Image (cartoon, rainbow, N blue to C red):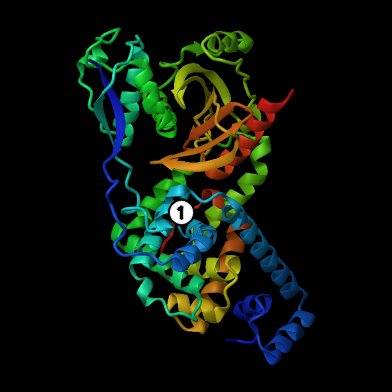
Amino acid sequence: MSLRWNYGRARDAAPAASPVSKRFSDQLIAMLPRLRRFAAGLTRSASEADDLVQAACERALAREHQFQEGTRFDSWMFRIVQTIWIDQLRAREIRKEDGDIAEERLGSDEPVRRVEARLALSEVRRAVSLLPPEQRVTLMLVTVEGLSYKQAAEVTGVPVGTIMSRLARARIALQQRLEAGDGERGSASDAKA
Amino acid sequence: MQKHSDEALVAYLDGELDAEERAHVEAWLGADPGVRDRLLALSETAGLLRGAFAEIAGEPVPERLLAAARGETASAGEAEIVVLRPTRDSQPPAPSRRWHIQLASAAGLFGLVVGLGAGYLGGNTLAPSGGLTARQVQTAAVNNWLDNAAGDYKLMVNAGGDALVDVPASGDNGDVLQKISQNLPQQVRLPDLKPWGLSFRGARLVVVDGRPAAQLIYNTDNKAIGPLALIIGSTKQPDIAPTFERRQDLNLLYWRHQGRASVLVGQSEIGYLWGIANDVAWQLDAI
């Protein structure tokens, strides 16, 4: 007799904590591309962004009952993503870690003709990643995700005036960094906005 | 907010000013060409920013996130643990030590709990009783092909250099492909990835989707892109568009087209990976 090896999944039995309403789940799935984009603007890698989105999904499902019908689902989810990310920043002292990753990703100066366009996009992303966390969040919410200042203020829990000042500083800093090429050379700075 | 300030300019661009504030900014713009230049630069930066993140929203959403949104997963970031359990079934033995080593490496690297003893790895052939046969390993690989692809990549990177290359690159890569293709159901083509700064280092024979496949290894000094492995095998499964997956710190793009299964594996940024995948698909399909 010989043995045949079949698969059994050790975590097959992991059930959801509570039944998930299909409508809520559908809303969440529809939001995933935007959540991934938002998270990508906050974090430094695709995997970190996806981990963040996954954690946000799990928290949202656990707190489904807290979502108020009639309010904006996207704002609610952005707030969850932002909250988890800020918690992670504080817990992991990510400032140093970010700097290491940024350095590691610089690569060589080897000329690669066909990646020039992508490098330009990467340079913008790197420049964003050098902004302080609060400015990053505000910039992504308003400029990329298209939220109004009022909606962004609700997500971040700050006055509209603070959104305006963070946004202006972020946009000016981003413009200056791109002009100076700092997106490729700079080091991380997670100083408070 | 000051009427003449960067805040006012940014808010003007964002359409967040009321009529009176807008009129003030427009008067300011009319009186100072330098401010107009600044407004233009800010506007361009906003466009660049949106462009830089636009493609992410168009990417396929990883299955693990879809599962999370459906409430089907455990905590974030955990590798799936797969346990191999023995069942009674007779299978013919086959001598293929190399595949065992590969699967074991994938297991070690990706949290597979494999119930095989060290003795199985030590010999050149497997004992008929109690050992894993090539077919059994292939069966495992069918269910695990992405894990295996990632495991093969890790194995290659950890071994360093060209230690595990079966057929190293040479002046005549046609000869390399001929040798590696001898063990495959179809002739393999070698995509030219030099425009991406990737140099072909050699080829290995691996198992993907339960079938032998060629792993083509590319290297570069640019850490944002490589090293990179392209695995090309045959499949009877229907075509699928390029799909993105993660295995720990690795990015994988896989697709099936006209009986050919392809996987790109590396730590490359996802943007590069999509570009390279497009290039590879085009070259593989070229007549």
Residue B287, quarter of picture: top right
**Residue A187 location (% of width, % of height):** 46, 53
Number of numbered tags placed on the structure image: 1
**Residue A110 location (% of width, % of height):** 59, 33
Q: Nearer the viewer, residue B55 or A183?
A: B55
Q: Nearer the viewer, residue A32 or B271?
A: A32
Q: Is residue B266 above or below residue A54?
A: above
Q: Is residue B4 above or below residue A85?
A: below
Badge 1 is on which residue? B66
Q: Residue at x 78, y 82 (%)?
A: B31
The subunit carrying tag 1 is: B
Q: Nearer the viewer, residue A44 or A65?
A: A65
**Residue B136 location (% of width, % of height):** 34, 21
Q: Nearer the viewer, residue B144 or A130?
A: B144
Give the amino acid type for the residue marked by disc 1 in the picture: Leu
Q: Residue at x 46, y 75 (%)?
A: A155
**Residue A66 location (% of width, % of height):** 36, 76
| Position of the N terminus of chain B by quadrant | bottom right
Question: Quick check: B71 left or right of A180?
Answer: left
